Image: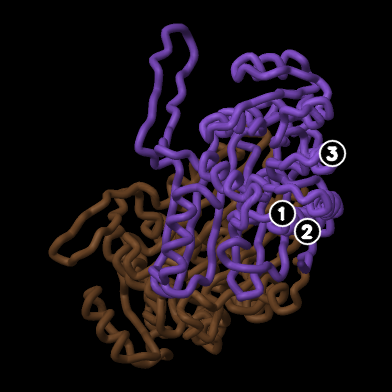
Chain colours: A brown, B purple
Amino acid sequence: MVKIGIMSFAHIHANSYAACLNALPGVSLAAIWDDNMARGRKAAKEYKTKFVKDLTDFLASDIDGVIITSENSKHREMVEAAAKARKWILCEKPLAPTMKDAKSIVDTCRKAGVGLGTAFPCRFSTPLVEAKAMLNSGQYGEVYAVSCTNHGQYPGGWFADTALSGGGATMDHTVHVVDLLRWMLGKEFTSVYCELGNQLHGKSLKTDDLGSLHLEMDGGIQVSHLASWSRPKSFPTWGDVTMEFVCEGGLITVDAFNQKLTVFDDGNEEVRWENWGDNADLALIKDFVDAVQSKCDPASTGMDGFCATAVTEAAYKSAKTGKTVKI
Amino acid sequence: MNVAILGCGGMGRLHAQMATNCGLRISYCADAIRKAAKGLADDFNAKAVTDPLKAIQAEDTDIVVITTPTPTHEPLVTAAAEAGKHVFCEKPFCRTSEDCKKAIASAEKAGVTLFVGHVVRYFQEFELMREGIQKGSIGKVGWLKLFRGGIFPGVKGSWFRDYEQSGGVTFDCMIHDLDWIRYVFGEPERIFCQAIMRSEPTSLDYSQVTMRMKSGIIATVINTWAAPSGFKVKAEICGSKGMIQFDSTESPLGAEPRQTGSGPTMFVPMSPVAISPYQLEWQDFIATIGGNHTPRVTPQDGLRAVEMAEAALKSSSTKQAVKL
């Protein structure tokens, strides 16, 4: 039985990961630690595990690996503590708000000899896996341009507090698509131009709630990406991940979560989409558990997290200077 | 009034029909390709000519419709104005902003009406979006995204495939979106553009633009001439109190004829309205002739749209934002 602990429930994804750990055979959610005790206790009760108040005790226990789902800017200190205790680590994305912190995280784990993964569940989304296979088959020829979106509803709380998040919607919703494109095309990003907006919520947010990015990849592939918290409260789902690949041999379009039912619910006075597709989080967590058992890195590594952070850091720099920034 | 159509392709035919619907008579159909001129002229009981100046200078021509390749617009507008004829010029107004200014000066000097066909301003779905925005039904707008396009137009050897002449999807097609964005959200501050503009082995163009408006609003525009088939338009406008979406693939009518031979059939979506946007555009143009009516699209609007598209192409080659 592989024992996994979760460090912090600050990020909403912790809930999904906890449910996945409970659903998978051969693994247990052994303990929860959280710097917010009330939040940690509540989560421990909900996911039927124990809450450990003291971080030293938590890391001294016989857990094999940890999932870190804290605020972005706390990833570094938590990874350092876990690596020191020689735990395998899956860290929520973005790996860190800055390249400096991301690099430190990668170096720390390498030196400690522990596996490090960045939580990019989209790599396990079945429609995206199929899209990658189509792109790699050669049937569609060279890729010239890609148009992407990763929209969401405003998550609230610390996400719009720069000290904890490092940035707004662009920090939150750029790295998935960046990681997907690196993974699908096997190419790196070379430059980015970015316009940031913060007017979708009546300028009440201190961070950006929209980033409109134009990137270039090796070989001159032109990529546009929209990262936003633009979906209204009344929108039927949380958001989307979409990509349109313009290739010599045709188009490949992805709307990764568009396997849905539309439910008209009078009781709650809402219309919502319910997804019936495969659960990518479950595959992500299984991959991490496998990595813990076989003592290797998960599929999306710390280095992948670092490369994604390099793009967001350059995007924020571009927005500040008004210039295209080399990556 | 009598109308001369210059350029007897698809748009020439469409405007001949709209003018006829408005009670005007088609007098001349001019096209360098005699067969094209004759084909359209026969259908509208008009005279076919290969020399556009002959159609422009004819006594029984009051209005000149220009649906020729973009680089020819300016000389034809000027010739028509000098002959004292009113002008309906298809978008893009001219191939350069300098040419637009020349054309405006010619029309002003001659005292004729000059109209530029930015028809998207007359599309019912775009009008309803504009009304919703102005009523404040989604609060204060912060961002919008427009998508337009489909298959690369024209056959091999067509002027559309010569980027010098057409300017590709950014100049020829996205100019619709750039104009509508300026119409609804005011003047732009700067523009960034990536356009692939490929010719070999296949003519493919795909253009991705972000525009910052003076108001701070961000507009993202994607246009394609890289799709293997079809044509579609999508819009998404986000405000502080909600969002408006439009998708032309969700249509009230569609047809898919059963193929009796081999090969696949294609579903064709349709969205009919009693009065087409092109008809509304013509009504607006006609009301402007000899009256005090200001049309929804002025020649200045046509010029600004060309300036925006020029800036986009400049950005695409310099890979930096261009101030407007």
Relative to B294, say whether A51 is above or below. below
Name the residue beneath numbered marker 3: B79
Q: How many marks?
A: 3
Q: CA distance from mark 2 to mark 3?
A: 28 Å
Q: Amino acid at mark 3?
A: Ala
Residue A146 seen from this side: no
Q: Nearer the viewer, mark 3 or mark 1?
A: 3
Rendering coords of residue B4 (x, y %): 70, 29
Q: Which mark is residue B311?
A: 2
For residue A140, side relative to residue A218 (left or right): left
Q: Amino acid at mark 1?
A: Pro
Q: For the point 70% across and 48% down, which residue is it?
A: B113
Q: Nearer the viewer, mark 2 or mark 1?
A: 1
Name the residue beneath numbered marker 1: B299
For residue A313, side relative to residue B252 (left or right): right
Query: Can you tell which quarter of the image residue B135 is in?
Result: bottom left
Which chain is mark 1 on? B
